[in-house]
Structure formats: C-alpha cells, structure tokens
Amino acid sequence: MLRAGLPTPLFLLLASMGVQGIVRAADAGSLPEHLADTGLYVSGSVTQLQPDVVQFSPQYPLWSDGASKHRWIKLPPGTSVDAAKPDAWDFPRGTKLWKEFSHGGRVETRYIERGMDGIWRYASYVWNATGTDAVLAPADGIRDLPVPGKRYSIPAQDDCRACHEGAPAPVLGFSALQLSPDLRGLTAGGLLRNLPTELLVQPPRIAAKDATERAALGYLHGNCGHCHNDDGPLAVLEMSMAQRVGAKTSTDAVVRSLAGVRSEFRMTGGTARVAPGHPEASVVALRMRSRDAREQMPPMGTYEIDVEALSLIGRWIEGLSVQQSE
Amino acid sequence: MNSLKMFVRIALVVAASFARAGDPPAAAPASEVLARGKYLVTIAACNDCHTPWKMTAEGPKPDMDRMLSGHPEGMVLPPAPKMPEGPWQNAFAATNTAWAGPWGVSFTANLTPDRETGLGKWTVRNFTETIRTGRHLGRGREILPPMPIPQYKNFTDEDLAAIFTYLQSIPAVKNRVPDPRAPGALASNGM
C-alpha cells in the first residue's frame, strides 16, 4: 500500500502505473504464534478439527515432492464465498485456509487468512518432532529443515505471495475448476453463493481431445497457471497455462502460447516452449525435468522431479500435432 | 526511443494519473520522477555492472553507447578461471558484466526498454517485485550475485517506480543477455 504523505505528483504517477496494486508485506506479526490458536482445532487439541472447518481436495493438486496433504477452509458464521466470477471467487473477510504437509509425520501447516481489513496474510507453522505443537515460522522461511530422507524448506512469506498473488484470486485450490465435482455439495451446504446455474447443471471440465490432454492441461493449470496466465503480472511473457472456466477457447489459448513458440529461456536441446511431437526438445518439459535452481520449473517449493507428471506432459507433447499449434 | 515518443509516453502516464485521481495537474511530475530515477540509478551504481566497460586512454570506463544494456551477447567468454584453494573465489570479465564464483557464472541484465531483450514489456509491478523478492519477475529463479538485492530490496516503492520510469526512458539496446551457467559449465556465452 502506498504510504500516506507521498508527494502528490509521485503518488499520482505511481497510481497510474499500478503500484497501488502491490501490497507490501502484510504485517504477519499479528498472526498467532501457535497453529492451535488459528481456529483449526478444538481447544486443547492438535488433531480434532473444529466443527465448522470443511475439508476439500482440488482435482489438479500442486506437486509438493510427494508430500501427503490435507486442506481445510473455514468461513465466518453466516458468510459464504461469492462464486459469481467462476475464475475469481470472492472470499469473505475472516476466511481461513490451512494446508497440512506430511512426510510420514506432519512437517508443516501453511495458513492463509483474509483479515477483517481485507488483506490476505500468509504463514507457515512448523510441527515439532512429536507432533504436539506447530509454531509460526520466520517470515524469511527456513531453508533445509531437517526432514528424514528429504530435502525440505519452509517457504518465505514472499514466496507465498509470489504464487498466490499471481492469479485472479489468491486462493488457488478452492475454485470452480479445482472443485468441479463438489460444486453442488458446496452450494447446498451454503459455502457458495451466486455460482452461475450452468456450472451446477454442467460442472466445468477442461476441453480436450482425450484424457491425456485433459490431465496434462489440468496439471499445467494446477502447477503453473497461477503464475503463467494472461491477466497476472507474468502476462508480459505472453504464455498462459491457466484454464478459464466458461472460456471454451482456454485450451486453444494455452496450446497457442506454448506450441512452436520460441522460448526466451535457452536450454541445450530446446528452443521452443513446446515442440509438438518432441518432448525432448520442449523447454517446458526440460525445465520440469531440471532441479538446477537456475532453470527448474516450478522455481520454488520443490527439490524433486514429478516423474509421473513429466511422463504425462511428455505423452501430451508427443501427441500434439503441428497443425494443432497453428 | 526518440525524444518525441518519450514525451508522449510520459505525458500519457501523467494524464492517466490525473484522470484516475481527479486532482488538478501538479508541476512537472514526469520530469521530477525522471530526475529522481536518474539520480538513484547513478548513486546505486547500476552502470558499474549493467553497462559494459571499455578500455580508454584514461583506463576502463563504462561504454555509455551501450548504457545499461547488460552483458554483450556477442562476447564469447572462455571458461571461467579455476581459482586455487584459498580465499580468492571470484573472477569478473573486463566488461564488468560477467561474474564467476561459487554460484556459477552470472551475466548482468539488459535494463534498457528493448521489448524483446530488455525491460520493454515489463510493468512497474514486475520491476518492483523483482527487486523486492530477489527473484526474476518476482516469481522465477533467484537473482544471482553480485546483484545487491539485500540492499536494493529496501528501496521504497516510489524509489523503485522512479528508477523504472527512468530506465524506460533511456535508449533501447537490442542485446540478448545469456542465461546464468552452473558452476563448472564449459561455455559461458549462453549455451
């Protein structure tokens, strides 16, 4: 947010350039020190959920190095998510979401809340070895947290914002496409309002020529589309991997922005973002295959290659024809 | 960018700001912002690394014909020297635009407004988030040494906007800077 007292000319110039859209690191100091105080569990417990906490599962989850994950949302009493805009649901002030990461035992629980001031805050709580308490991580995160058999880091709050604030809505896994199979239940349960009727009649589905393409495009949406879309800050790259509900041309737009398009990032063997028929020459696949920090994709939050997804993306690229990309 | 285009660009930016804010025009805001940006770019020593240096009779100096255009793409470098065991760890090219160290080899970026190879397509948000987070475009790979991100991330939003405004006003130079290389990479000209 812009500071008060800024000289008018500079304020106006900044406003015209969109700087008012940059929310400086929101004060996360107001967040509780312990996860147990965020409202997830009943008092005195770190396992028993509060009755108004709702578990959900996106159909195209983010790869997190094989961690098992649980996700929950909690809305203030008497409120609901305004789902009128299918790709940018509006969450009421006071919304809280949690995502728990486990590798054998619980490692961390990430937390997002929309404060009563309307600002989104992001944090992570790190579990102790006995699983009896999770404590607020430093704003800069923790690099190389000791987790048996794994390299693991807790993201910095800037990292949280990097992904969550590049999309139309900062909640990535709770959306019309991600929860397509659950829309009727969520509406009936009062969590959603104003969802377009046609999405209840026919829940959103990625347009694709076959199941492989649908799964590949879904993976790209869930893992890449929050940054690589056509209306966020990375729109300057003119590369979109995000699906838009209701936009029947979403798949075409994604393919057009990838297939046969020269990659600005140069890698040995790859010149196009996606080379139809040739995953070995496709920079998207090559960067998914890398875990060199200079070139890997995604650039953060993972130290291990998603082998299954790489195979899926490879099969999709093999099946792409040059004509499809034109 | 010629001066007429720059004038029109600044005028549009300023006009847009007045239109949004509904305030009467203030005195020469564009020139104030440009001057502030130029001042900050100067004292922050951006030219030291982002402008290739050339040898002159008075010794090495930034080549201002290539101002802030980053490491020259046509400059093929041999592998970085292997440093002996001990405290000497880093090396840099005579242009001051390529640096080798434990992180590999990094090349300074093209900060001119060229649309294909520089910052021409960037928004002020892209620039601000890059400096603030130390990640390319605020979301990509980490920006490597010797870029002083730990210091620059403390610039205010208005400082960064002024710097960006100034950078968008300088002559565009088409120069595709190589991507950084891993430690031990043989070639250091991009591929």
Image (tube, coloured by chain):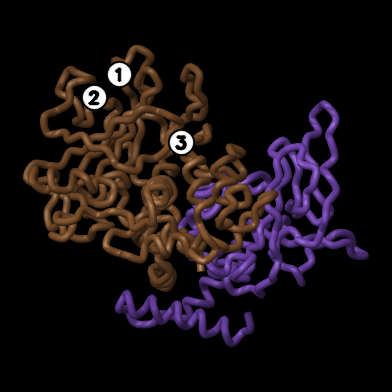
Chain colours: A brown, B purple
Q: Mark 2 points at which residue?
A: A36
- Looking at the rendered image, the quarter that the N terminus of chain B falls into is bottom right
Q: What residue type is labelled 3?
A: Asp
**Classed neighbour count for the residue bearing mark 1: other residues with Cα under 10 Å, few (<14), some (14–19), many (≥20):** some
Chain letter of the residue carrying label 3: A
Residue located 39% across and 46% down the image: A215
Horizontal arrangement in the rendering, residue B137 relative to residue A50 (left or right): right
Residue located 46% across and 36% down the image: A140
Residue A311: x and y in percent read 51, 40
Chain letter of the residue carrying label 1: A
Residue B90: x and y in percent read 78, 39
Q: Same chain, marks 1 and 2?
A: yes
With respect to residue A259, does A210 lie above or below? above
Q: Name the residue under label 1.
A: A133
Q: Residue A140 carries which label?
A: 3
Residue located 29% across and 41% down the image: A58
Q: What residue type is labelled 2?
A: Ala
Chain letter of the residue carrying label 2: A
Q: Do the residues labelled 1 and 2 touch (CB within 8 Å)?
A: yes
Counting residues from the start of the chain, the first of labels 1 and 3 encountered is 1
Query: In front here: A203 or B182?
Result: A203
Query: In front here: B95 or B119?
Result: B119
**Classed neighbour count for the residue bearing mark 3: other residues with Cα under 10 Å, few (<14), some (14–19), many (≥20):** few
Residue A21: x and y in percent read 36, 60
With respect to residue B31, does A18 lie above or below? above
